[in-house]
Amino acid sequence: MAGAIGQAPFANVPDSGLTSLWGLDKIKAPEVQAKGFKGQGVTVAVLDSGIDYFNSYLSNNIWTNSREIPGNKIDDDRNGYVDDTRGWDFTQNDNTPLDIDGHGTFVAGIIADPVFGVAPGAKVMPVKVAANDLAFDNDIADGIYYAVKNGADIINISYGQQSEINLKLQQAIRFARENNVAIVMSAGNQRQQGATQPTNPALFSVLGNYGIAVGAIDQTGKLADFSNPAGNNRINYVVAPGVDITSDDLGDSLTSWSGTSFSAPYVAGVAALMLSANPNLTPSQIESILTATANPKGITAL
Protein backbone atom coordinates (compact mmCIF):
# COMPACT_ATOMS: atom_id res chain seq x y z
CA MET A 1 0.00 0.00 0.00
CA ALA A 2 2.78 2.42 0.88
CA GLY A 3 4.05 1.89 -2.65
CA ALA A 4 1.02 3.75 -3.96
CA ILE A 5 2.42 6.98 -2.56
CA GLY A 6 6.11 6.16 -2.69
CA GLN A 7 6.59 5.68 1.04
CA ALA A 8 8.26 3.04 3.17
CA PRO A 9 5.96 0.38 4.66
CA PHE A 10 3.62 1.76 7.29
CA ALA A 11 4.16 1.05 10.99
CA ASN A 12 2.50 -2.09 12.28
CA VAL A 13 -0.79 -1.85 14.14
CA PRO A 14 -1.41 -4.66 16.66
CA ASP A 15 -3.79 -7.32 15.37
CA SER A 16 -7.32 -7.13 16.69
CA GLY A 17 -7.15 -10.67 18.02
CA LEU A 18 -10.71 -11.23 16.78
CA THR A 19 -11.25 -14.25 14.57
CA SER A 20 -13.93 -12.36 12.66
CA LEU A 21 -11.36 -9.75 11.63
CA TRP A 22 -8.52 -12.08 10.68
CA GLY A 23 -8.76 -11.08 7.03
CA LEU A 24 -8.22 -7.40 7.74
CA ASP A 25 -5.31 -8.21 10.03
CA LYS A 26 -3.77 -10.51 7.42
CA ILE A 27 -3.66 -7.84 4.72
CA LYS A 28 -2.69 -5.14 7.25
CA ALA A 29 -5.66 -2.94 6.44
CA PRO A 30 -5.63 -1.32 9.92
CA GLU A 31 -2.12 0.04 9.23
CA VAL A 32 -3.42 1.84 6.14
CA GLN A 33 -6.63 3.05 7.75
CA ALA A 34 -4.60 4.46 10.65
CA LYS A 35 -2.88 6.73 8.12
CA GLY A 36 -6.26 8.16 7.13
CA PHE A 37 -6.61 6.25 3.86
CA LYS A 38 -10.01 4.57 3.99
CA GLY A 39 -11.18 4.57 0.39
CA GLN A 40 -12.78 7.98 0.57
CA GLY A 41 -13.66 9.41 -2.82
CA VAL A 42 -13.54 5.98 -4.48
CA THR A 43 -16.48 4.05 -5.97
CA VAL A 44 -16.34 0.27 -6.27
CA ALA A 45 -18.98 -1.29 -8.51
CA VAL A 46 -20.12 -4.64 -7.13
CA LEU A 47 -21.28 -6.75 -10.08
CA ASP A 48 -23.09 -9.44 -8.18
CA SER A 49 -26.48 -10.52 -6.85
CA GLY A 50 -27.26 -6.95 -5.83
CA ILE A 51 -26.73 -5.34 -2.45
CA ASP A 52 -29.08 -5.06 0.51
CA TYR A 53 -29.02 -1.27 0.48
CA PHE A 54 -31.44 -1.24 3.42
CA ASN A 55 -28.72 -2.81 5.59
CA SER A 56 -28.03 -0.13 8.20
CA TYR A 57 -24.33 -0.99 8.40
CA LEU A 58 -23.85 -0.38 4.69
CA SER A 59 -26.37 2.40 4.11
CA ASN A 60 -23.82 5.21 4.35
CA ASN A 61 -21.59 3.49 1.81
CA ILE A 62 -24.15 2.87 -0.92
CA TRP A 63 -23.44 4.82 -4.10
CA THR A 64 -26.26 7.07 -5.24
CA ASN A 65 -26.75 8.66 -8.62
CA SER A 66 -26.91 12.36 -7.81
CA ARG A 67 -27.91 13.18 -11.38
CA GLU A 68 -31.18 11.26 -11.09
CA ILE A 69 -34.36 12.48 -9.35
CA PRO A 70 -35.86 9.53 -7.48
CA GLY A 71 -39.29 8.30 -8.49
CA ASN A 72 -40.16 10.75 -11.24
CA LYS A 73 -40.05 8.06 -13.95
CA ILE A 74 -37.76 10.23 -16.06
CA ASP A 75 -34.24 9.42 -17.18
CA ASP A 76 -32.92 12.71 -15.81
CA ASP A 77 -29.27 12.06 -16.59
CA ARG A 78 -30.09 10.49 -19.98
CA ASN A 79 -27.89 7.49 -19.35
CA GLY A 80 -30.52 5.08 -20.65
CA TYR A 81 -31.72 3.95 -17.21
CA VAL A 82 -34.81 5.48 -15.60
CA ASP A 83 -34.59 6.33 -11.89
CA ASP A 84 -31.35 4.42 -11.38
CA THR A 85 -30.71 6.22 -8.12
CA ARG A 86 -28.99 3.19 -6.53
CA GLY A 87 -27.69 1.29 -9.53
CA TRP A 88 -29.43 -1.16 -11.84
CA ASP A 89 -30.69 -4.75 -11.95
CA PHE A 90 -29.66 -6.25 -15.28
CA THR A 91 -31.35 -9.57 -14.51
CA GLN A 92 -34.78 -7.91 -14.44
CA ASN A 93 -33.93 -4.68 -16.28
CA ASP A 94 -35.22 -2.44 -13.52
CA ASN A 95 -33.95 0.08 -10.98
CA THR A 96 -34.09 -2.10 -7.86
CA PRO A 97 -30.76 -3.96 -7.61
CA LEU A 98 -31.73 -5.38 -4.22
CA ASP A 99 -29.95 -8.51 -3.04
CA ILE A 100 -32.19 -11.40 -2.03
CA ASP A 101 -29.62 -14.17 -1.58
CA GLY A 102 -26.84 -12.42 0.33
CA HIS A 103 -23.82 -13.01 -1.92
CA GLY A 104 -23.49 -9.44 -3.17
CA THR A 105 -24.17 -7.95 0.25
CA PHE A 106 -21.43 -10.12 1.73
CA VAL A 107 -19.01 -8.95 -0.97
CA ALA A 108 -19.98 -5.30 -0.44
CA GLY A 109 -19.40 -5.67 3.30
CA ILE A 110 -15.86 -6.92 2.79
CA ILE A 111 -15.18 -3.83 0.72
CA ALA A 112 -16.85 -1.10 2.74
CA ASP A 113 -18.47 -2.20 6.01
CA PRO A 114 -17.39 0.20 8.80
CA VAL A 115 -16.07 -2.70 10.91
CA PHE A 116 -15.38 -5.62 8.57
CA GLY A 117 -14.57 -3.60 5.45
CA VAL A 118 -11.15 -2.97 3.95
CA ALA A 119 -12.14 0.48 2.70
CA PRO A 120 -14.88 1.83 4.99
CA GLY A 121 -14.75 5.23 3.33
CA ALA A 122 -15.51 3.92 -0.15
CA LYS A 123 -18.86 3.80 -1.91
CA VAL A 124 -20.23 0.56 -3.33
CA MET A 125 -22.32 0.72 -6.51
CA PRO A 126 -25.03 -1.98 -6.69
CA VAL A 127 -25.00 -3.55 -10.16
CA LYS A 128 -27.10 -6.69 -10.14
CA VAL A 129 -25.96 -9.19 -12.76
CA ALA A 130 -26.73 -12.48 -11.01
CA ALA A 131 -29.76 -14.31 -9.66
CA ASN A 132 -30.17 -17.84 -8.33
CA ASP A 133 -26.38 -18.27 -8.35
CA LEU A 134 -26.25 -17.64 -12.10
CA ALA A 135 -24.62 -14.76 -13.95
CA PHE A 136 -24.79 -14.52 -17.73
CA ASP A 137 -22.13 -12.96 -19.94
CA ASN A 138 -24.43 -10.37 -21.47
CA ASP A 139 -25.63 -9.15 -18.07
CA ILE A 140 -22.08 -8.89 -16.76
CA ALA A 141 -21.08 -7.01 -19.90
CA ASP A 142 -23.98 -4.58 -19.53
CA GLY A 143 -23.05 -4.15 -15.88
CA ILE A 144 -19.47 -3.28 -16.78
CA TYR A 145 -20.57 -0.65 -19.28
CA TYR A 146 -22.98 0.79 -16.71
CA ALA A 147 -20.34 0.92 -13.98
CA VAL A 148 -17.76 2.59 -16.20
CA LYS A 149 -20.17 5.16 -17.62
CA ASN A 150 -21.50 6.05 -14.17
CA GLY A 151 -18.21 6.78 -12.49
CA ALA A 152 -16.93 3.56 -10.95
CA ASP A 153 -13.20 3.52 -10.25
CA ILE A 154 -13.00 -0.22 -9.57
CA ILE A 155 -15.18 -3.15 -10.60
CA ASN A 156 -15.42 -6.33 -8.52
CA ILE A 157 -16.65 -9.49 -10.25
CA SER A 158 -17.03 -12.49 -7.95
CA TYR A 159 -18.36 -14.95 -10.50
CA GLY A 160 -16.66 -17.36 -12.87
CA GLN A 161 -17.20 -20.06 -15.47
CA GLN A 162 -15.08 -22.77 -17.05
CA SER A 163 -16.24 -21.97 -20.58
CA GLU A 164 -15.01 -19.09 -22.71
CA ILE A 165 -16.80 -15.78 -22.37
CA ASN A 166 -18.64 -14.27 -25.31
CA LEU A 167 -17.45 -11.41 -27.49
CA LYS A 168 -19.70 -8.84 -25.83
CA LEU A 169 -18.15 -9.46 -22.42
CA GLN A 170 -14.65 -9.44 -23.88
CA GLN A 171 -15.35 -6.03 -25.42
CA ALA A 172 -16.80 -4.73 -22.15
CA ILE A 173 -13.69 -5.76 -20.23
CA ARG A 174 -11.52 -3.98 -22.78
CA PHE A 175 -13.80 -0.94 -22.53
CA ALA A 176 -13.24 -0.74 -18.78
CA ARG A 177 -9.51 -0.88 -19.27
CA GLU A 178 -9.58 1.79 -21.96
CA ASN A 179 -11.50 4.04 -19.57
CA ASN A 180 -9.11 3.66 -16.65
CA VAL A 181 -11.29 1.40 -14.51
CA ALA A 182 -9.61 -1.45 -12.62
CA ILE A 183 -11.26 -4.88 -12.63
CA VAL A 184 -10.75 -7.37 -9.79
CA MET A 185 -12.06 -10.91 -10.28
CA SER A 186 -12.28 -14.11 -8.28
CA ALA A 187 -10.08 -16.95 -9.54
CA GLY A 188 -12.67 -19.67 -8.99
CA ASN A 189 -13.24 -22.59 -6.62
CA GLN A 190 -12.63 -25.64 -8.82
CA ARG A 191 -9.13 -26.79 -7.79
CA GLN A 192 -10.48 -29.92 -6.10
CA GLN A 193 -12.12 -30.79 -9.42
CA GLY A 194 -8.79 -30.45 -11.22
CA ALA A 195 -8.68 -26.77 -12.20
CA THR A 196 -5.12 -25.53 -12.72
CA GLN A 197 -5.80 -21.88 -13.56
CA PRO A 198 -8.43 -19.19 -12.95
CA THR A 199 -11.88 -19.42 -14.49
CA ASN A 200 -13.31 -16.86 -16.89
CA PRO A 201 -13.76 -13.92 -17.01
CA ALA A 202 -10.69 -13.71 -14.78
CA LEU A 203 -8.56 -15.85 -17.09
CA PHE A 204 -9.43 -13.85 -20.21
CA SER A 205 -8.79 -10.61 -18.36
CA VAL A 206 -5.41 -11.47 -16.90
CA LEU A 207 -4.12 -13.10 -20.08
CA GLY A 208 -4.99 -9.89 -21.90
CA ASN A 209 -3.62 -7.75 -19.07
CA TYR A 210 -7.05 -6.25 -18.43
CA GLY A 211 -7.35 -6.96 -14.71
CA ILE A 212 -6.23 -9.02 -11.73
CA ALA A 213 -7.33 -12.46 -10.53
CA VAL A 214 -7.55 -13.35 -6.84
CA GLY A 215 -7.16 -16.73 -5.17
CA ALA A 216 -8.03 -17.60 -1.57
CA ILE A 217 -5.88 -18.40 1.45
CA ASP A 218 -6.81 -19.52 4.95
CA GLN A 219 -5.64 -18.06 8.26
CA THR A 220 -2.33 -19.94 8.08
CA GLY A 221 -1.54 -18.51 4.65
CA LYS A 222 -2.17 -21.80 2.87
CA LEU A 223 -3.89 -21.73 -0.51
CA ALA A 224 -7.41 -22.93 0.14
CA ASP A 225 -8.13 -26.45 -1.08
CA PHE A 226 -10.84 -25.11 -3.36
CA SER A 227 -8.97 -22.09 -4.74
CA ASN A 228 -7.84 -22.13 -8.35
CA PRO A 229 -4.11 -21.34 -8.64
CA ALA A 230 -2.43 -19.00 -11.10
CA GLY A 231 -1.39 -21.76 -13.49
CA ASN A 232 1.68 -21.70 -15.71
CA ASN A 233 1.03 -18.35 -17.36
CA ARG A 234 2.69 -15.21 -16.05
CA ILE A 235 -0.40 -13.26 -15.05
CA ASN A 236 -1.64 -10.66 -12.59
CA TYR A 237 -2.63 -13.00 -9.77
CA VAL A 238 -2.57 -12.52 -6.01
CA VAL A 239 -4.15 -14.26 -3.05
CA ALA A 240 -6.22 -12.84 -0.22
CA PRO A 241 -8.24 -14.13 2.73
CA GLY A 242 -11.07 -16.38 1.60
CA VAL A 243 -11.76 -19.00 4.29
CA ASP A 244 -14.17 -18.46 7.19
CA ILE A 245 -14.71 -14.80 6.32
CA THR A 246 -17.22 -12.74 8.32
CA SER A 247 -19.25 -10.03 6.63
CA ASP A 248 -22.73 -8.61 6.17
CA ASP A 249 -25.80 -10.68 5.41
CA LEU A 250 -29.35 -9.64 4.62
CA GLY A 251 -31.32 -7.79 7.25
CA ASP A 252 -28.51 -6.33 9.36
CA SER A 253 -27.13 -9.74 10.27
CA LEU A 254 -23.67 -11.25 9.88
CA THR A 255 -22.57 -14.58 8.48
CA SER A 256 -19.41 -16.48 7.58
CA TRP A 257 -18.57 -17.84 4.12
CA SER A 258 -15.59 -19.19 2.20
CA GLY A 259 -14.61 -18.85 -1.45
CA THR A 260 -12.58 -16.82 -3.90
CA SER A 261 -15.73 -14.74 -4.33
CA PHE A 262 -14.75 -13.22 -1.02
CA SER A 263 -11.03 -12.96 -1.67
CA ALA A 264 -11.60 -10.64 -4.64
CA PRO A 265 -13.31 -7.88 -2.61
CA TYR A 266 -10.36 -7.78 -0.21
CA VAL A 267 -8.20 -6.84 -3.18
CA ALA A 268 -10.83 -4.46 -4.55
CA GLY A 269 -10.83 -2.82 -1.13
CA VAL A 270 -7.05 -2.53 -1.13
CA ALA A 271 -7.24 -0.93 -4.58
CA ALA A 272 -9.73 1.57 -3.15
CA LEU A 273 -7.29 2.39 -0.34
CA MET A 274 -4.58 2.92 -2.92
CA LEU A 275 -6.74 5.29 -4.95
CA SER A 276 -7.73 7.25 -1.86
CA ALA A 277 -4.01 7.75 -1.22
CA ASN A 278 -3.14 8.45 -4.85
CA PRO A 279 -6.12 9.14 -7.16
CA ASN A 280 -3.82 9.33 -10.18
CA LEU A 281 -2.95 5.63 -10.19
CA THR A 282 -3.89 3.78 -13.38
CA PRO A 283 -5.22 0.21 -13.38
CA SER A 284 -1.84 -0.99 -14.64
CA GLN A 285 -0.07 0.78 -11.79
CA ILE A 286 -2.50 -0.65 -9.25
CA GLU A 287 -1.91 -4.16 -10.56
CA SER A 288 1.85 -3.68 -10.70
CA ILE A 289 2.00 -2.43 -7.12
CA LEU A 290 -0.24 -5.24 -5.88
CA THR A 291 1.75 -7.99 -7.58
CA ALA A 292 5.15 -6.45 -6.82
CA THR A 293 4.49 -5.82 -3.13
CA ALA A 294 2.45 -8.92 -2.32
CA ASN A 295 4.19 -11.22 0.12
CA PRO A 296 5.84 -13.92 -2.04
CA LYS A 297 5.59 -16.21 0.97
CA GLY A 298 1.91 -15.45 1.42
CA ILE A 299 1.08 -18.97 0.30
CA THR A 300 2.74 -21.36 2.70
CA ALA A 301 1.95 -24.52 0.74
CA LEU A 302 -0.08 -25.76 -2.21
Image (cartoon, rainbow, N blue to C red):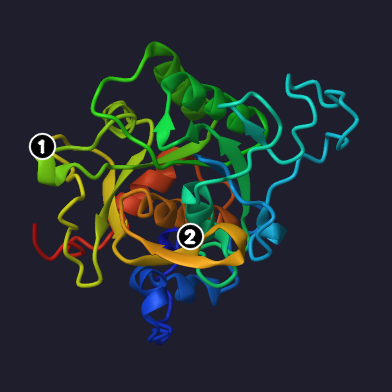
* Residue 154: mark: none
Q: Give the labeled residue for mark 2.
A: 110
Residue type, label 1: Asn
How far across and how far down the image is residue 147, in percent? 60, 33
Label 1: element kind: loop
Q: Which quadrant would the C terminus be assigned to in this image? A: bottom left
**273 versus 213 height, above or below:** below
Res. 274 in view: no
Q: Residue furthest top?
A: 167
Measured in 3D between alpha carbons, the distance from the residue under mark 1 to the one under mark 2, in whole angstroms, is 29 Å
**155 versus 59 height, above or below:** above
Instruction: Specify which label sits upstream in the sequence, 1 or 2.
Output: 2
The mark closer to the camera, 1 or 2, is 2
**208 versus 269 height, above or below:** above
Q: Which residue corresponds to the image point at 55% horizontal and 28% vertical from the top-left?
A: 143
Location of residue 191 by image quarter: top left
* Residue 232: mark: 1
State left or right for residue 97 relative to residue 217.
Answer: right
Q: Which quadrant would the N terminus be assigned to in this image? A: bottom left
